[in-house]
C-alpha cells in the first residue's frame, strides 16, 4: 500500500524500488547550474537513517535462518544508527536488542537507544590504538555473543554481506530508477562501507561509467559513524575497486556544510551529509555538467551536542 | 630463525585451551574495564581490575607486598602455580600485572600471546559468564625486586648522566608534545613533551595485526636497529601511567633479552608534572 502510504506495520515502510526514499535537488549550494545535484534523504526511512535498510535485511536473514527466538535477541556494536534501527525493528517484532556503543557517541543517541528499548553497554574509547585493531565496542559485543549464545546473536554489520546486499537490492535500484539511468556521480561517506559497496556495485553494473566518489574524515575525527583511511584497512566490506575517487575532508567542514544545507536548502542534514556535500562541490567544480546523487545518511537531530561543539556560536544566546 | 630470549614466558591461545583446568595452572584476566571480564571470560579465569586491585588505593603506588599477598590468596593463587595472564587492550594491563608478579618474585608467570582479542577471534575458544569458584590460598611473596622499577630519581640521574636508553612508548603526538594525553583521559600532566634524550617507539611497534608479538628479528629491527636502543646500556621504558610501558618492558626484557630494563610507572604523568625538570618538546602547543 506504499502508493497511498498506508501500512500494516512499520516494517512495511522499509524502502525499496516501489517505496524509495525521496531525492531532492540541491540548488543554491551546487556550484554549477548545469549540474543536477540530488540529495537522497535517508532520514526519511521509518527509523530515521540509512541503517534501516541494513537492519531490515540483517533481521530478515536471521529470521529466515531461525536465529531469533523469544529468548534469543540481538547484540550489536554500533555508533548509534544501526542500533536504533535494530532496536525499533525488533521492538515491532518482539525481540530483545543490546547495543554496544563507544563512549564518544553523542548523549542524544545513547538516550534514544534506551528510549527505543535497547539495553545499552558503553565502552571506553580506544586510547593509543594499534593501527587496524578492532574497536572495544566490537569486542564487547562479540564477547556477549560468544559467552551467551543462547541469549544473543550478533549480526555484525561490519562483516555481514546482508549490509552490502541491502544497498545492492534497494538503494542502487532506487537511484537508477529515480535518475532514469542518467546518474554520472555517486557521492557517499564511508563507515561499514555497506552503502558504497552495494550501491556502487549495482550502479556500475548498469553503467560502468558511473563515477563513485567517497569522502572520509582525517584521523582522530569527530564525525560519528565514519571511518578514516587507516580505519578502512580493517573494514571487511570496503572494496576500493568500486571507488573512483577518495577524498579526505576535515571534519570542521562537515559541520559547516551541514549548517549550509539547513540554512540555504532547508535540509536538516547531519554532519556526514555535510562532508559528502563538500566532496560533491569539489567534484562539480571540475565537472560542471552531470547528474550526481549524494546519499545523506541521517539528519541533524541526533547531533545537537556535536554541532554545539563544532559551531560554538550556536550556543550563544541560548540562555538568559 | 632467531628465537625470543625467553620463549617460556609466552603461551599461545591453543596452549591455554589445552591446559585449562589442570592442577597448578591459574588463568587471570587483567582489564582496565572489567566489563569485558563480566561479559565473558575464559572458563575458570580469575578477573583482576587494574585500577582498583593492582594499585594502592590511597597513595599513588604499586600494590604493596601485603596487598599483593592478600590479592593472590583471595584469588586462590599459590607461589608455585603457573599463572597465565591475558587481558584487554592488547595485554597492556596483563603486562603490567606480569611486571608486578615479577617484582614480588612469582617464578612462573606467562602472558597469553594476543590477549583476549585473539581468544575472542578464534571459533574453537569458549567464553563464559559463569563466576569462577576459587579456593583461597596462603600466598607468601618475596621481597620486592625493585631493580625492575624506575623511580623519578633514577630517571633524573639517567637524563643527567646520558648513560641509559630512554624509550618513550606513547603515541607520536604525545611524544612531540602536540597533546598532553590521548583524548578524553583524566590522568594527565602539567606539561607536554618528552624526557630529554628519549626515543619514540610507540608500544604498538611490537605487535602484529592480530595483537601477537612480532618475531624476534623484527623486534630487533624495531628496537635495536631503527630506534638504536643500545643493548650494552640499561634501559628505562615509560608511557603516561606505566601500563603501555609494561608491554614494552616485557618485550625488551623477555623477548629481546636485554639486561637492566626498568619500567618507569610514574611515567609522563609524574615527570611532566615535576617542577624544574628539563623537557623536550618538538611542536608548539
Image (spheres, coloured by chain):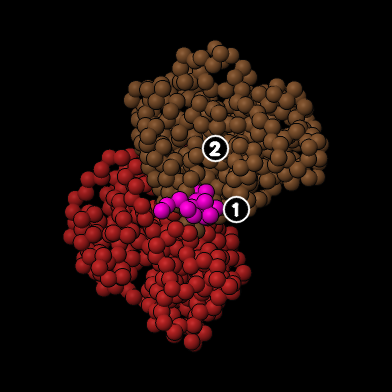
Chain colours: A brown, B red
Marks 2 and 1, how far apart at CA:
17 Å
Discs 2 and 1 carry the same chain letter: yes
Determine which quarter of the picture holds residue B146. bottom left
Quadrant for the N terminus of chain A, please. top right
Badge 2 crowding class, 10 Å Cα cut-off, few under 14, some 14 to 19, many 20 or more, is many
- Specify whether A239 is left or right of B275: right
Q: SS for tag 1?
A: helix
Viewer-proximal residue among A306 and A164? A306
Viewer-proximal residue among A264 and B17? A264
> Which comes before the other along the chain, label 2 or label 1?
1
Work out whether residue A239 can be spotted: no
Q: Which region of the structure is painted magenta?
A: A306-320
Q: Would you name the residue on which mark 2 appears?
A: A299
Viewer-proximal residue among B167 and A22? A22
User: In the image, what residue occupies the spot 37% across and 34% down?
Assistant: A115
Mark drawn on residue B163: none
- Specify whether A165 is left or right of B158: right
User: In the image, what residue occupies the spot 81% across and 36% down?
Assistant: A34
User: In the image, what residue occupies the spot 34% across and 42% down?
Assistant: B39
Letter of the chain that mark 2 sits on in the rendering: A
Q: Residue B271: percent from the left, percent from the top?
A: 43, 76
Residue A297, placed above or below residue A271: above
Q: SS for tag 2?
A: loop
Q: Would you name the residue on which mark 1 appears?
A: A252
Q: Residue B281: percent from the left, percent from the top?
A: 55, 75
Amino acid at each position: 500500500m506504499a502508493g497511498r502510504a498506508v501500512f500494516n506495520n512499520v516494517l512495511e515502510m522499509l524502502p525499496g524500488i516501489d517505496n524509495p526514499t525521496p531525492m531532492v535537488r540541491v540548488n543554491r549550494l551546487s556550484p554549477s547550474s548545469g549540474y543536477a545535484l540530488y540529495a537522497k534523504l535517508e532520514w526519511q526511512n521509518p527509523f530515521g537513517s540509512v541503517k534501516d535498510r541494513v537492519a531490515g535485511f540483517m533481521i530478515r536473514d536471521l529470521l529466515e535462518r531461525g536465529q531469533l527466538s523469544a529468548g534469543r535477541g540481538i547484540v550489536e556494536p554500533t555508533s548509534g544508527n544501526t542500533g536504533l534501527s535494530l532496536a525499533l525493528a525488533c521492538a515491532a517484532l518482539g525481540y530483545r536488542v543490546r547495543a554496544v556503543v563507544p563512549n564518544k557517541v553523542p548523549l542524544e543517541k545513547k538516550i534514544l537507544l534506551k528510549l527505543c528499548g535497547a539495553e545499552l553497554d558503553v565502552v571506553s574509547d580506544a586510547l593509543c590504538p594499534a593501527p587496524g585493531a578492532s574497536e572495544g565496542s566490537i569486542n564487547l559485543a562479540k564477547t556477549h555473543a560468544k559467552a551467551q549464545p543462547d541469549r544473543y546473536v550478533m549480526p555484525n554489520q561490519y562483516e555481514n554481506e546482508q549490509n552490502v546486499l541491502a544497498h545492492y537490492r534497494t538503494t542502487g535500484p532506487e537511484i537508477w530508477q529515480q535518475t532514469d539511468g542518467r546518474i554520472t556521480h555517486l557521492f557517499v561517506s564511508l563507515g561499514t562501507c555497506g552503502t558504497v559497496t552495494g550501491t556502487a556495485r549495482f550502479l556500475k553494473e548498469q553503467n560502468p561509467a558511473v563515477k563513485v566518489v567517497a569522502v572520509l574524515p582525517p584521523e582522530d575525527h569527530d564525525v560519528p559513524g565514519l571511518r578514516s583511511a587507516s580505519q578502512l584497512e580493517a573494514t571487511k566490506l570496503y572494496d576500493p575497486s568500486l571507488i573512483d575517487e577518495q577524498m579526505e575532508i576535515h571534519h570542521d567542514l562537515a559541520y559547516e556544510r551541514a549548517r549550509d544545507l539547513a540554512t540555504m536548502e532547508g535540509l536538516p542534514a547531519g554532519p556526514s551529509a555535510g562532508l559528502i556535500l563538500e566532496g560533491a562541490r569539489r567534484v562539480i567544480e571540475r565537472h560542471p555538467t552531470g547528474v550526481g546523487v549524494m546519499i545523506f545518511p541521517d539528519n541533524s537531530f541526533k547531533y545537537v551536542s556535536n554541532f554545539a561543539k563544532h559551531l560554538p556560536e550556536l550556543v550563544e544566546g541560548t540562555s538568559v | 630463525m632467531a628465537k625470543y630470549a625467553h620463549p617460556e614466558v609466552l603461551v599461545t591461545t591453543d596452549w591455554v585451551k589445552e591446559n585449562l583446568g589442570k592442577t597448578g595452572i591459574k588463568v587471570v584476566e587483567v582489564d582496565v574495564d572489567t566489563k569485558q571480564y563480566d561479559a565473558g571470560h575464559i572458563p575458570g579465569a580469575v578477573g583482576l581490575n587494574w585500577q582498583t586491585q593492582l594499585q594502592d588505593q590511597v597513595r599513588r603506588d604499586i600494590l604493596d607486598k601485603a596487598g599483593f599477598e592478600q590479592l593472590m590468596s583471595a584469588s586462590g593463587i599459590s607461589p608455585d602455580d603457573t599463572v597465565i595472564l591475558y587481558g584487554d587492550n592488547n595485554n597492556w594491563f596483563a603486562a603490567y600485572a606480569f611486571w608486578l608478579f615479577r617484582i614480588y618474585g612469582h617464578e612462573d608467570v606467562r602472558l597469553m600471546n594476543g590477549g583476549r582479542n585473539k581468544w575472542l577471534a578464534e571459533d574453537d575458544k569458549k567464553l563464559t559468564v559463569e563466576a569462577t569458584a576459587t579456593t583461597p590460598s596462603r600466598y607468601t611473596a618475596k621481597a620486592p625486586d625493585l631493580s625492575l622499577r624506575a623511580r623519578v630519581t633514577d630517571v633524573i640521574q639517567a637524563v643527567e648522566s646520558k648513560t641509559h636508553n630512554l624509550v618513550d612508548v606513547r603515541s607520536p603526538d604525545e611524544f612531540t608534545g602536540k597533546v598532553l594525553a590521548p583524548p578524553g583521559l583524566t590522568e594527565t600532566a602539567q606539561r607536554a613533551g618528552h624526557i630529554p634524550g628519549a626515543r619514540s617507539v610507540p608500544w604498538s611497534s611490537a605487535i602484529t595485526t592480530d595483537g601477537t608479538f612480532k618475531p624476534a628479528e623484527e623486534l630487533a629491527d624495531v628496537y635495536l636497529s631503527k630506534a638504536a636502543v643500545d643493548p650494552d646500556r640499561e634501559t628505562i621504558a615509560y608511557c603516561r601511567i606505566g601500563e603501555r610501558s609494561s608491554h614494552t618492558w616485557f618485550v625488551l626484557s623477555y623477548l629481546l633479552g636485554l639486561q637492566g630494563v626498568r619500567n618507569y610507572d610514574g611515567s609522563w604523568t609524574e615527570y611532566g608534572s615535576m617542577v624544574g625538570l628539563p623537557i623536550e618538546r618538538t611542536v608548539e602547543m
